[in-house]
Amino acid sequence: VESLTVAELAKKLHREPSELVKKLFMLGTMATVNQELDKDGIELICADYGVEVEEEILIDSTDLETYFDEEQNEADQIERPSVVTIMGHVDHGKTTLLDSIRKTKVTEGEAGGITQHIGAYQVEVNDKKITFLDTPGHAAFTTMRARGAKVTDITILVVAADDGVMPQTVEAINHAKAAEVPIIIAVNKMDKPSANPDRVMQELTEHGLVPEAWGGDTIFVPVSALNGEGIDNLLEMILLVGEVEEYKANPKRRALGTVIEAELDKGRGSVATLLVQDGTLNVGDPIVVGYTFGRVRAMVNDLGRRVKSAGPSTPVEITGLNDVPQAGDRFVVFEDEKTARSIGETRAQQALQAQRGEKTRVSLDNLFEQM
Ligand code: GDP
Ligand code: MG
């Protein structure tokens, strides 16, 4: 539904329909109580009443960062692993590539298989770590970006060499550009006889991604996610970009980061996968996560192992929150539990009020749902 009648809007605003008709007349529109108002009309009246119209209530928890302003020593800033997201058109090989990287690297020196899935994992290449987010690329990326959270350092854009640039390829380029995230191109499916990497390069050049061989500065790596060819090269290129960009963090401070995934588990309660972006997260830390709070009860890493602490760029699954946060929510660790609880409770209340569309706020989506 894209509209409301004058009477319906009046009800929502707790006014008499006739009052709205009068108001519309003053604003230069002749209307009856049953007249349909479009979005612009609704906004016009709401503005006149000083009511804010919200298209969608996006709970933005980036303001949590204001609690993260303790004094810092520049010398404590050290190199941290790059956080990488894989994007690309459907069927171009994102999942296969993530699995392939995971298989070749994660299990090296690790006993047993990996059963745990926490939405992110780390691999070690040349004694350096790289963090991969394996949340469904586009959705996670857009939700998180819409909420103001920046989690990705580098985007791997997968383009199938037998298919070339497709609509979601362009979408991914636009997201990465808007977020100012460096892009590395993985030209995938090179094992196929019909692979045509030149065509991929040519098509991407039209989108401003010019390969180094043609005088540009975009890294293209031919790979086969299926047989593993080129994967080592791709990982080395990620390290190279990481070195150039010099991603740093301070492991000595209280932790700050973003929720990657969260759900309610029957046995364990609220379970959230967090990406620590700065500082070190410890078991027992008092924490506010979006609009939830608690104390970190237990932490599990990407290999399913219990850990006591997690430094910058590390994904961990935690329990101990009073409620389930949302992907893209920010988290901050506090010095004491009392402060965390008080801030967490206040925020939960604010979120609830915003969702109910209390008095001065009317959500258009909610309005339409009721019709
Ligand atoms: P996604 O939709 O981007 O996650 O793509 P998938 O990883 O699910 O791959 C789609 C299909 O392409 C699957 O059948 C894969 O087995 C196949 N595929 C992925 N990578 C390669 C590759 O490097 N070579 C070949 N021949 N097939 C591949
Ligand atoms: Mg997939």
Image: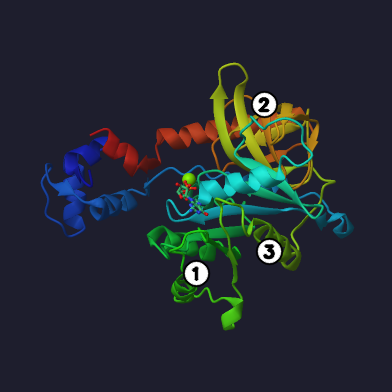
Residue occupying the point 72% across, 65% down = 240
Q: Nearer the viewer, residue 266 or 14?
A: 266
Residue 300's x, y, as percent? Answer: 71, 30
Label 1: element kind? helix
Q: Can residue 13 be seen in this view?
A: no
Q: How crowded is mark 1: few (under 14 residues within 10 Å), some or many (20 or more)?
A: many
Say whether marks 2 and 1 touch (CB < 8 Å): no
Q: Earlier in the sequence, mark 2 or mark 1?
A: 1
Residue 29's x, y, as percent? Answer: 15, 57
Queried on whether the Cβ of the residue with tag 1 lies below 8 angstroms from ligand 1, the answer reads: no
Amino acid found under the numbered disc labelled 3: Met
Say whether marks 3 and 2 touch (CB < 8 Å): no
Of badges 3 and 2, the one in the foreground is 3
Residue 52's x, y, as percent? Answer: 39, 48
The vertical placement of 144 against 173, above or below, is above
Residue occupying the point 49% across, 64% down = 173
- Which residue in the protein does label 3 denote? 237
Q: Nearer the viewer, residue 57 or 238?
A: 238
Amino acid found under the numbered disc labelled 1: Pro
The vertical placement of 249 against 316, above or below, is below
Work out how far the residue at label 3 is from the one at label 1, CA to CA, in angstroms: 18 Å
Work out how far the residue at label 2 is from the one at label 1, CA to CA, in angstroms: 46 Å
- Which residue in the protein does label 1 denote? 197
- Which residue in the protein does label 2 denote? 319
Residue lying furthest bottom: 215
